[in-house]
Image (cartoon, rainbow, N blue to C red):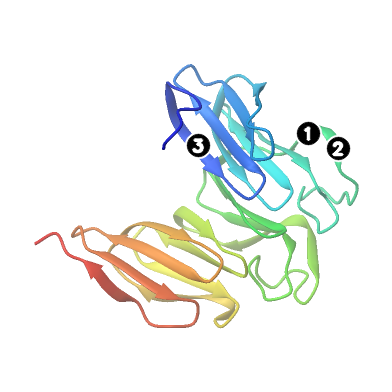
């Protein structure tokens, strides 16, 4: 049976360790997978992301805060030692996306930056083969981002979808046009096109249509 953990939630992010939930009052709560314990984290929160041991949130002013593992450069400020409290590591941020030991952020000016584990290039050319420990620019003119375990994606202002990382290389390449939204997982990607059609593909494969709006 389904269990209601919280009500009044407008945004949430989940991962293996738990869920970060943003309420209608812009309060951020952490729900641990190990205990279902609900803990208030912060106020004045815009959005959040759950990574592999490192969690992130953006406040309504665009400041990015990080807490958790830092050994792969997840904080983006050069540190490799974790903190018990959330610390600010970037500003003017619109979106944050995180996965296995790395993260991407989208700034309000359309620039995308990455940091963290980079064996296969999900955060671009910086630290390729190991890790990037500081936020480094990857691509510009972007309106939305997503990242999986070893590949990343970005939707440009012209609605074309860029991809880079494992199976693709470190330089972003166009894989699809007329994209409205995108999400990525360990190996798979799902994209919603402007015409309402839904597409899915495995890492390194060609997109295939799943659903149509017709």
Q: Tell me what residue is drawn at x 55 percent, y 54 percent.
A: 111
- Spot occupied by residue 88 in the image (x, y as percentages of width and height): 75, 34
Q: Is residue 45 visible?
A: yes
Element type at marker 2?
strand
Q: Is residue 60 visible?
A: no
Q: Tell me what residue is drawn at x 61 percent, y 19 percent.
A: 43
Query: Please, which residue is most extreme toward the top here?
Result: 25
For mark 3, what is the residue? 12
Quote the CA–CA distance across marks 3 and 1.
20 Å
For mark 1, what is the residue? 87
Element type at marker 3?
strand
Q: Are marks 2 and 1 in contact (CB under 8 Å)?
A: yes
Q: Nearer the viewer, residue 138 or 59?
A: 59
Q: Nearer the viewer, residue 208 or 96?
A: 208
Q: Nearer the viewer, residue 1 or 193?
A: 1
- Spot occupied by residue 153 in the image (x, y as percentages of width and height): 49, 64
Element type at marker 1?
strand
Q: Are marks 2 and 3 in contact (CB under 8 Å)?
A: no
Q: Residues within 10 Å of mark 3 (few under 14, many from 20)?
A: some
- Spot occupied by residue 174 in the image (x, y as percentages of width and height): 42, 75
Q: Are marks 3 and 1 in contact (CB under 8 Å)?
A: no
For mark 2, what is the residue? 83
Nearer to us of marks 2 and 3 is 3
């Amino acid at each position: 049976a389904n269990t209601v953990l919280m009500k009044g939630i407008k945004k949430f992010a989940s991962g293996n360790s738990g869920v970060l939930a943003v309420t209608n009052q812009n309060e951020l709560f952490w729900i641990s997978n190990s205990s279902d314990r609900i803990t208030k984290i912060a106020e004045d929160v815009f959005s959040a992301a759950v990574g592999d041991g490192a969690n992130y949130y953006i406040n309504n002013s665009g400041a990015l805060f990080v807490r958790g593992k830092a050994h792969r450069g997840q904080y983006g400020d050069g540190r490799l030692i974790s903190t018990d409290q959330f610390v600010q590591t970037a500003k003017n941020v619109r979106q944050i996306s995180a996965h296995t030991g790395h993260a991407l952020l989208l700034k309000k000016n359309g620039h995308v930056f990455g940091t963290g584990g980079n064996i296969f290039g999900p955060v671009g050319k910086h630290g390729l083969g190991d890790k990037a420990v500081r936020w480094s620019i990857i691509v510009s003119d972007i309106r939305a981002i997503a990242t999986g375990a070893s590949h990343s994606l970005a939707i440009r202002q012209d609605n074309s979808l860029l991809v880079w990382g494992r199976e693709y290389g470190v330089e972003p390449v166009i894989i699809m046009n007329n994209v409205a939204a995108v999400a990525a997982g360990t190996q798979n990607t799902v994209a919603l096109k402007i015409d309402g059609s839904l597409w899915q593909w495995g890492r390194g494969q060609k997109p295939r249509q799943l659903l149509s709006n017709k």
